[in-house]
Image (cartoon, rainbow, N blue to C red):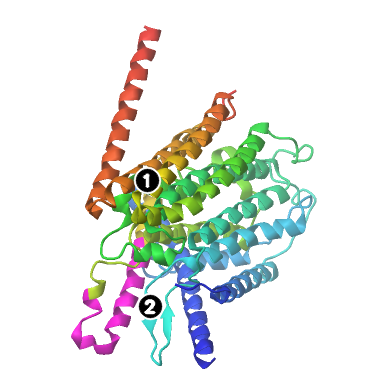
Amino acid sequence: MEITSTLFTAKAIYVGIIFAITLGVAAYSTYFERIIAAFMQDRVGPDRAGPFGILQPLADAVKMFMKEDFIPANSNKWLFIAGPCLSMLTALMTSAVVPFGDQLDLGDGIILDLQGIDVNIGILWVFGIVSLGVYGVLIGGWASNNKYSLIGAIRAASQNISYELAMGLSIIAILMLSGSLSTKSIVETQQNGHWNILYQPLGFVIFLVCAFAECNRTPFDLPECETELIGGYHTEYSSMKLGFYLFSEYINMFISGAVMATLYFGGYDYLFNDYVAQISWLGEYAYNVSALLGLVVLIVKALIFVFIFMWVRWTLPRFRYDQLMGLGWTGLIPLAMFNVVLTGASMLFTVNDGGSNWMTVGASWAGVIIMLVVTFAYSEMKYKKKKLATA
Amino acid sequence: MNYQPSDFLPILVQLVAALAFIVATMLATHWLGPKRHSVLKDDAFECGIESVGDARTPISVKYFLVAILFVLFDVEIIFMYPWAVNFMGWVKSTSDVAITMFLEMLVFMGLLLLGFIYVIKKGVLTWEK
């Protein structure tokens, strides 16, 4: 009983720390988003609040708090408040199943897993919470009783559900390789450099595109594109309610980066885990140092993904709505199905009969290359036919 | 690895932390900001043009069809999850079971693909018209 209660306290402290890290990273993502935008457009960016403008997120937060908390007269008041709260709640709950590190030995036989909850449904938890996130946007847009908000909300909902399909399909291939739904087991099968990105190049690309769409980031930011819809589903929002919508987007970016690192880039694995865990001058702390280093490595991997999100925002223009739906349904879903079949076939032919892991890797890359060649040849053929028909 | 319902307990800590953060922020922003009301200001903002009628008018049926199709396909994808989780075990045990299971999944996926092609040929996803 004593050990259980100490363990629970340790776990509660750990959850609190991850919570604080998530909020801190999200707050500073807003600053770095502007710095990176400024760098890419050859501007200076925010530099007034504190040295290099590093107090900018704080200034933004104070401004948000001091603004009028506006609620339109003909809206549904409680739903209007519930919308952003639900968005924020779902964004904050996803991080629970992400394994941020291996185990810490706290002495007295207490082993703390550096993961909120290690449960056998693992990745399904992420999907469940992410699909609840649609409700936040939909409720907010509907409750505003504004035509632009409603169109934005409906666009957001149908975009999110469309890309969820391809995302779910791309995960299936990962589950086939790891044989478990638990995120911890998925990471453990990737230790020592057997990262899933080697086995799943196509699956990763599909997942990345879907993550962009789920976070409503450019080039899929149609729900809030200001040239068509004023501000989309958050047109009527002000003060911290608007802040919640924007903030939850940044939290989702960080968490989806962490999930992608977990699924495809080995999670907290950094190739030298075993080596660090055996350094002699660290003595009994060597194991803990190695675990904490893993935590730092996972956060760095997630931050690299956050940078990619920002990089793409200033590189690609926005899709048109029919292009967006066309890519999601007729592009990504058949591709993801092909990926599942390819993974299954390559596993059948290489896992037994004395085949090595590298053969599985080779088979999956060969499949992707064949697919690319066939698609290219097909589109070339179609293009020539079209040319003949018009000539 | 032995999983127990008590594994879920730390989620309560996270839920309480998240709810506390949200409620505190909402109360603070409600309390801190100024409040000035007028009939025109409390109206819905539609680019400065007076808003006509209710916003909750019927919208394109395409969105509804997408939602229905999502439910259909999502359920079918969820059926593949148990199969996927067990596949590695089959491959490692005897290759006969694995090949049978692989072929069965191909049949399932083929049927799914047929439905998918039907939906596309029906023009549910052509947004231009």
> Image quadrant of residue B53?
top right
Tell me where residue A107 appears, x and y as whole percent: 38, 91
Residue on which disc 2 sits? A103
Q: Amino acid at mark 2?
A: Gln
The stretch in magenta equals A275-301
Res. A45 visible in picture: no
Res. A381 visible in picture: yes
Asked which secondary structure carries label 1, the reply is helix
Q: Nearer the viewer, residue A136 or A51?
A: A136
Q: Nearer the viewer, residue A301 or B88?
A: B88
Tell me where residue A391 appears, x and y as whole percent: 36, 6
Query: In this rendering, would B16 be left or right of A43?
Result: right
Q: Is residue A146 above or below residue A371?
A: below
Q: What is the C-alpha distance between the residues marked 2 and 1?
A: 32 Å
Residue sticking out furthest to the top: A391
> Image quadrant of residue A269?
bottom left
Q: Is residue A282 above or below residue A293?
A: below
Tell me where residue A354 appears, x and y as whole percent: 22, 53
Q: Is residue B44 above or below residue A88?
A: above
Asked which secondary structure carries label 2, the reply is strand
Residue on which disc 1 sits? A344
Q: Predominant secondary structure in magenta?
A: helix
Q: Amino acid at mark 1?
A: Gly
Q: Residue at x 66, y 37 (%)?
A: B64
